[in-house]
Image (cartoon, rainbow, N blue to C red):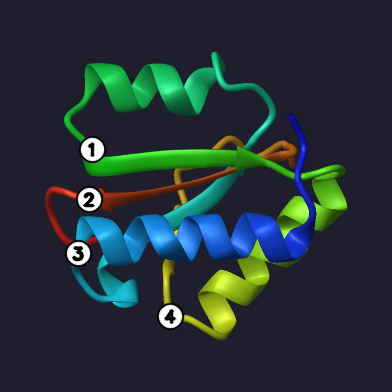
């Protein structure tokens, strides 16, 4: 179920605080579908822990949320994320540095 910007950012940041580590240790990106390539790749390759995701109302809103988390909080952009913009914003802490 899609949630607004403030809720999405609060929930993602709350997840990071609960899971531990600094913001800079986490990766963030978007995906079109929770069953799509990023999530399959995350299951097959050990990309790390703490995977969480939330759905924004639009792909533009998701991109703005990612930009906020990268620019204002210092998360790392997941450069291997699916190139198509999606409404799903995900975060995870990689097992190795990005």
- Between 12 and 88, the one lying in front of the other is 12
Q: Quadrant of residue 46?
A: top left
Q: Residue 20 carries which label?
A: 3
**What secondary structure is marked by label 1?**
loop
For residue 89, side relative to residue 42 (left or right): right
For residue 63, side relative to residue 71 (left or right): right
Residue ID at (27%, 44%): 50
Q: How crowded is mark 1: few (under 14 residues within 10 Å), some or many (20 or more)?
A: some
> Separation of disc 4 and disc 2 at Cα?
15 Å
Instruction: Name the quarter where the N terminus is drawn.
Output: top right
> Separation of disc 3 and disc 4 at Cα?
15 Å
Compared to residue 78, the image places residue 54 above or below, namely: above
> Separation of disc 1 and disc 2 at Cα?
5 Å
Q: Which mark is residue 47?
A: 1
For residue 95, side relative to residue 79 (left or right): left
Q: Quadrant of residue 39?
A: top left
Cβ–Cβ below 8 Å for labels 3 and 4?
A: no
For marks 3 and 4, the one nearer the N-term is: 3
**What secondary structure is marked by label 2?**
strand
For marks 3 and 1, the one nearer the N-term is: 3
Cβ–Cβ below 8 Å for labels 1 and 2?
A: yes
Compared to residue 55, the image places residue 74 above or below, namely: below
Residue hosting label 2: 94
For marks 3 and 2, the one nearer the N-term is: 3
Q: Residue furthest left?
A: 96
Residue ID at (76%, 45%): 3
**Viewer can see residue 26:** no
For marks 4 and 2, the one nearer the N-term is: 4
> Separation of disc 3 and disc 2 at Cα?
13 Å
């Amino acid at each position: 179920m899609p949630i607004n910007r403030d809720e999405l950012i609060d929930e993602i940041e709350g997840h990071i605080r609960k899971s531990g580590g600094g913001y800079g240790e986490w990766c963030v990106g978007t995906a079109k579908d929770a069953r799509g390539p990023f999530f399959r790749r995350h299951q097959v390759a050990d990309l790390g822990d703490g995977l969480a995701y939330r759905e924004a109302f639009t792909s533009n809103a998701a991109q703005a949320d990612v930009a906020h988390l990268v620019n204002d909080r210092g998360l790392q952009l997941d450069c291997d994320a699916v190139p198509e913009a999606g409404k799903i914003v995900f975060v995870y802490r990689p097992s190795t540095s990005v």
